[in-house]
Image (cartoon, rainbow, N blue to C red):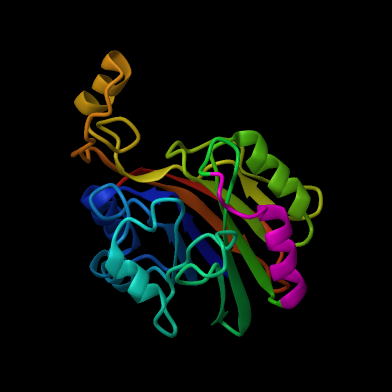
Amino acid sequence: MEILLFGDVVGRPGRTALSTFLAGREFDFAVANCENAAGGFGLTRRTARELLEAGLHVITSGNHIWRHRDILEYMEEEGCPVLRPANYPADNPGKGFLVKEVSGARVMVINLQGRLFMPSLVDCPFRTVDAILRGNRADVILVDFHAEATSEKQVMARYLDGRVTAVVGTHTHVLTADAGILPGGTAFITDLGMCGSAAGVIGMNTEEAMSRFTTGRQTRLKVAEGDERVNGLRMTLNENGKVEKLELVDGET
């Protein structure tokens, strides 16, 4: 089984880059974090459908998922493949995990959010994932851990090693070089990076980003344009659902 996992999709450049990359490629399952896909912040029903039509099977997210009201209504629809972090309070719209049938295998995708240097009003991601795993079975389990701290992401990977197929970090928009397979067989990378313009600062226009750091003012950020790139991870599983091969996705489209 060939699985593609992509970092945060940032604005129209990210959507275009990812759609171009997926066109004509062969794979069994594709997941991307799209919490920044609509104008650089949040996700809308229209942009979600655009990315699903391009070839994604599941969309994960993070702290920006609440930005646009219409995505909240969409997440409540039956069969919607857009996830929000599972460790937000349970009365929030949407769901934090789902299971899909892929080539005769049950593939579960779990979306979690970290707590270190992140909005703190979320439940413990470790206890949340334990509860999900206790109550649900799958042949392949993919965890998107949307977190700021590299240490928290690495702890989550070690915590789940041998219990899930892969733990992939998102949120920082910077592809890390540590992709590997842990002793228990779980694939891990600290951050999948981003799909978007490399001409700016983590997908946003350089001028506004620089102004924030040099003046201390919260200027409005705009999505950068040009030098569109795709970041992520290609994962090959054998017939027993074990990870055989990992390959970084890092290039222009």
* Front-most of residues 105 and 164: 164
Q: Residue 125 in magenta?
A: yes
- Note whether residue 251 is visible: yes
* Front-most of residues 91 and 118: 91
Q: Quadrant of the N terminus?
A: bottom right
Taking the view exactly as shown, the residue that stands out farthest to the top is 214
* Front-most of residues 202 and 76: 76
Q: How many marks?
A: 0
Left or right of 135 in this view: 48: left
Relative vertical location of residue 108 with respect to residue 34 in this rendering, above or below? below
* Front-most of residues 121 and 32: 121
- Note whether residue 164 is visible: no
- Residue 79 percent coordinates (x, y): 44, 83
Quadrant of the image occupied by residue 138 = bottom right
Which portion, as a residue range, is magenta? 120-135
Q: Main secondary structure of the magenta part?
A: helix
Q: Residue 215 in magenta?
A: no
Left or right of 72 in this view: 70: left
Q: Which residue is at 34% across, 75% downward?
A: 74
- Residue 215 percent coordinates (x, y): 26, 15
- Residue 224 percent coordinates (x, y): 21, 37
Q: Which residue is at 61% across, 72% downward?
A: 108
Left or right of 20 in this view: 1: right
Q: Which residue is at 60% across, 43% downward?
A: 115
